[in-house]
Image: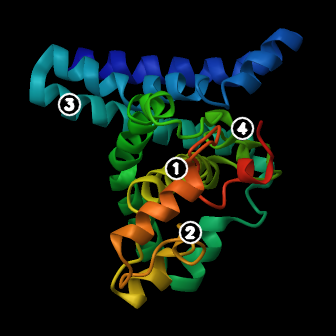
Amino acid sequence: MLALYITLTTSLLVGAVFLHLLPRLGKRGQEWSENLCYAPAIDLFLSYFMLLPLLVGFLVQKGMGLGIGLASELSALWLWILFHELIHREHWQEAKIHRTNSRIIGGWRNHLAVWITALAIPVFWVVRFAEILVYPPLTQLVKLPKYNAKDWVNVSRHKFSGLIGYDLIWCLYCDWMTGVWSLGTEMLRNVESFWCPIRFYSDKKCANCQIDFPDIENGWISSDGTMQDVEKLLTQKYANVQNCSWFGHGDRDTPHD
């Protein structure tokens, strides 16, 4: 059990060191390092840090192995935070996100709250897998528009001056999950408008959802409409088009042959 923990933790730390050394290996290393910040490469290296330890742990020691895998991830994370802040100790006295928020709302509340957000990580992985496995067949079957995932799923906040250690790792988490969620929302806009362009009976729900689903106010049939209205709308929006995209999608501004 201890050997598995040490092996997994060491492997994670070696991976972190590799990521830090890669951009220092000349122009080619810088290119590779930059590519790792974008999908699909980022999916692979995040899987190495977040999923592989759990998988290896489970294969070696089943349920106990999952706990060991998680413990190794947390240990490697904290060691990285400590070393990263030590290496960049010249920034210690500068402004910090966690220090500022702790002063505003209280230290233990702030830190507990931010760690609670980590419980959502599995949700974002499920969304990402759906983007990779579920949505692509729809682009072939019913002509939903294709997306370049790298435009959404990427990280760049590590380039922000003075962002180190504890603040950096949480900003990178937000960077990644925001892109994953936004891409998923964009895909859902196509799904909703294609298969059920009907406003909700609840005006409150319509108001709450229209930010993420603008077609609610820009095309969906009223809840007191008829199926003939729906049929007419679908024919108008999707007959003789290259992509069956949601009504406000950018490709609808581009004329097709």
| Residue at mark 3 | 66
- Residue 44 position, x and y percent, is 51, 22
Quick one: label 3 or label 1, which is nearer the N terminus?
A: 3
Q: Nearer the viewer, mark 3 or mark 2?
A: 2
Quick one: label 2 or label 1, which is nearer the N terminus?
A: 1
Residue 143 vertical placement versus 122 (above, below): above
Q: Nearer the viewer, mark 1 or mark 4?
A: 1
**Dot 2 surroundings within 10 Å: few (below 14), some, or many (20 or more)?**
many
Residue 140 vertical placement versus 257 (above, below): above
**Which residue type does callout 3 highlight?**
Leu
- Residue 167 position, x and y percent, is 62, 55
Q: Of the numbered discs in the image, which one, if any, rests on residue 75?
A: none
Quick one: label 2 or label 4, which is nearer the N terminus?
A: 4
| Residue at mark 2 | 215
- Residue 101 position, x and y percent, is 59, 75
Q: Secondary structure at mark 1?
A: helix
Residue depicted at x 79% and y 13%: 29
**Which residue type does callout 2 highlight?**
Asp
Q: Nearer the viewer, mark 4 or mark 3?
A: 3
Q: Secondary structure at mark 3?
A: helix
- Residue 103 position, x and y percent, is 59, 81
**Which residue type does callout 1 highlight?**
Met
Hey, which quadrant is residue 133 in on the image? top left
Q: In 3D space, how far apart are the residues under numbered discs 3 and 1 (Cα atoms)?
A: 23 Å
| Residue at mark 1 | 177
| Residue at mark 4 | 87
